[in-house]
Image (cartoon, helix red, strand yellow):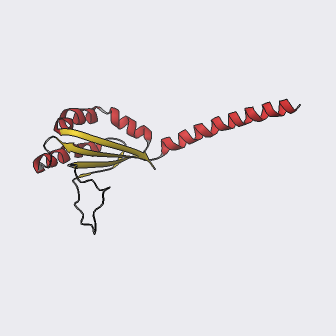
Amino acid sequence: MKRLYSAALVILLAVGGTSHASDAQAESDDRKIHHLVVVWLKQAGDEKLRQQYIEESKRLAQLPGVLAYHVGTPAAIQRGHANAALDESYDVAVSSVYESREAYEAFLKNPEYLRVAQQVLRPLVDKYKVYDFSE
């Protein structure tokens, strides 16, 4: 009898754990996705190329699923003391927000995004870093 209760408890926990895992996945799919790209251009510090990247990049703000889209250059904020964590070596940064994981994944497959990213922006880029997170 004790074995029967133990087996029933194990099954109940396993089924309950699976349900919670799928609930957590569904919940994370509904959360907004933030996408941050930090870009170093092939011609670092070139103001004309920075502006070209910014203007060409703005087309992406109109694609489906994009809630917010911001692109700019280092802010050069004056601070009271040096901060080793501060990195102003990049040329351009892009911050965008998507309504869900599904919307972001669709954005990444959108033919206009692929065209602009591969044919227009990447030829200007030496390296870049991408940071994605959900709310």
The residue lying toward the viewer, choosing from 86 and 14, is: 86
Q: In the picture, residue 129 is in which quadrant?
A: top left
Q: Is residue 55 left or right of residue 108?
A: left
Left-right relation of 71 to 46:
right
In the rendered structure, the answer to whether residue 22 lies left or right of residue 5 reads left
Q: Is residue 133 above or below residue 79?
A: above
Q: Give coordinates of residue 41: x percent, y percent.
A: 18, 43
Residue drawn where x is 79% and y is 30% of the image: 7
| Residue 25 located left or right of residue 58 | right
Residue at screen point 22% across, 55% down? 74
**The N terminus lies in which quarter of the figure?**
top right
Q: Percent position (x, y) of residue 26?
A: 54, 40
The front one of 99 and 42 is: 42
Query: Which x, y percent locates residue 81?
Result: 28, 66
Query: Which image quadrant for residue 128?
Result: top left
User: Which residue extends farthest bottom?
Assistant: 80
User: How many labels were placed on the picture?
Assistant: 0
Q: Residue at x 62, y 40 (%)?
A: 20
Q: Name which residue lies at 27% across and 42% down.
A: 60
Q: Quadrant of residue 131?
A: top left
In this view, the residue farthest toward the right is 1
